[in-house]
Each structure stands twice: as structure tokens, then as C-alpha cells.
Amino acid sequence: MIRVFFLLTLVPGFCLGQTDALRIYEEREDRLISVFADNNALTPHTIVIEVESKGLKSVKPLPDNIVISGQKKRQLLAQFIIPENRGWTFSYKFEYMEGDVNAKHDDDFVYQLPFEKGKSFRMTQGYNGRFTHQGVNALDFTMPEGETVVAAREGLVVQIREDSNRGCASDRCIQDSNFVRILHSDGTMAEYHHLQKNGALVSTGDVVKKGQAIAKSGATGFVSGPHLHFLVFKTDGKKQIDFKTRFEFSKGRIGFLKTGERYTAFD
């Protein structure tokens, strides 16, 4: 999850703001100045803009949040009318976060256990767990390195990290986790963490099916031993909101998983 803040001051002339994910730029036509955004990432982004101006009239009120979908170009953010024969200035600041602030998790969706059919693993830490899940709706499955991780839900692979070989039981390693991130149809995203180095079995841009192999488990990042960390989340424009997820854990049995229980992925 990335949150970035920029402050840009405009006077008559050209200006732009740019990040790896977003490009913010202006175009002028006659007496109209328009501010656009290009999203270079696969993930949607939520943008918040605050504008201060003198001598300009806004074409329409600015919304609280603007969502730009993945790889969208020329998303209109704001428009202003330039006065005739008068000076003008305006400045704006913007923040953005990965994710869609308007996403609504489908609470009725039934997730698949994120490992191969026939395999059994214990869920050692659940929602709001007392170790590293305090205040977080995430699940940890203890499993040896090299086990096949599968998609718990279908979606678009939007981000992968697989270059880390570092893991330790300290927050010094918290940024070293390999992961796969998948965007769901309801706008939420799932992350599968602590994966093996070079363990991704998919590529960014792939559309994966529920139950499809996506990675190999590992012990990278903030870990005391090999395990899979799974969570589903969205952004509210300021912070990450994560969700409890229901699984089918045996034929016809659906519900929330319980800490300490061993679960077997079934055919």
C-alpha cells in the first residue's frame, strides 16, 4: 500500500507532477485549463486533490476522492476557466493510494483454501491474532517452504515481488517479504506473503482462476518460520481496510476459519 503527497504551484504556463505509478499534467485550450492523470499501474488508485486558486473559476466542484482505474489514461481531475486580461494563479496538492475507495467487499463470496487439493495445513494465526495480527483481518497457515500456493479467488495479477531471500523474526525484515497481489472483481485485492525467492508461478497482467497455482511458499520477510500470510483488503483513501473472508473448508461446510485448526483442501 502506497500513499504519496505532492504540492504543486501553478502560474500561467506548464507544470506536471509525476510518480512511478501516476503522471499528473495540465493542458490548455483557449480559456480552459484541464488537469489530467495517467495511471501507469495495473492497480486502481484513489486520488485526493485540494486546490487553492486566485482569478480562476472551477468548472465543477472537486469530489472528495477520484478513482482512476488501472492503466487508465487522461482521467480528468479538475478544470478551470481562465479569465480574460487578468492575472491568475492556483496551487494544488494531491495524495494518492493504491486501491479503489469505492470498492465494496462481497461478503457472500466463498473463498477456496489457498493451497493444493489434498494438502493439509494448520491455521496458526487468525483474525486479530495476538502475535502480528493485532487489529488485522489476516490468516497465517504454517507450511514448509516450496509448497504450492493457489488463488483463493479469481482475479487479475497486479503486482509481484520475488527477489528477496531475507527473512527473520524481527521487524527489520518487514519490507523483505515476497508476495503476489491479485485484484478481484469487487475492487478488493488479496495478498499472498512470505513466498519463496523466484517462487512466483504467474506474471503481472495474468488473469488467474480460483484454485490456480500462483506461487511457492517460503519464509521471507518478518517471519519466525515458513508460513503463508493471506489477507483481502481495500483502501478508504487514507488507510488499508481488511476483511474477514469465508471459506469452504469441507464439502458443503462454509464459514470463518478457526485458529489452531488443521484444514485440508478437498476435491
Image (spheres, rainbow, N blue to C red):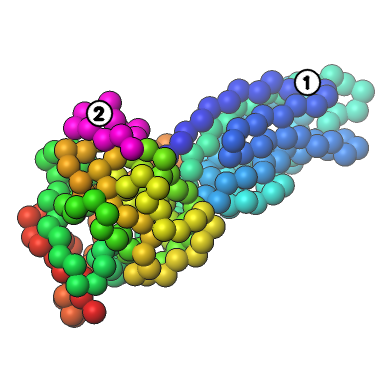
Three-letter residue code for mark 2: Asp
Marks 1 and 2 sit apart, C-alpha to C-alpha, by 45 Å
Which residue appears at 20% of the width and 75% of the height? 266
Give the x, y percent position of residue 42: 55, 51
State the residue in front, 70 or 157.
157
Q: Residues within 10 Å of mark 2 (few under 14, many from 20)?
A: few
Q: Secondary structure at mark 1?
A: loop
Which residue appears at 82% of the width and 23% of the height? 12
Q: Which residue is mark 2?
A: 171
Give the x, y percent position of residue 227: 21, 49
Q: Secondary structure at mark 2?
A: helix
- Mark 1 or mark 2: which comes first in sequence? 1
206 vs 57: above or below: below
Q: Which residue is mark 1?
A: 11
Three-letter residue code for mark 1: Val
Give the x, y percent position of residue 108: 30, 69
Q: Is residue 60 magenta?
A: no
State the residue in front, 141 or 39.
141
For the N terminus, the image quarter is: top left
Q: Quadrant of residue 173?
A: top left
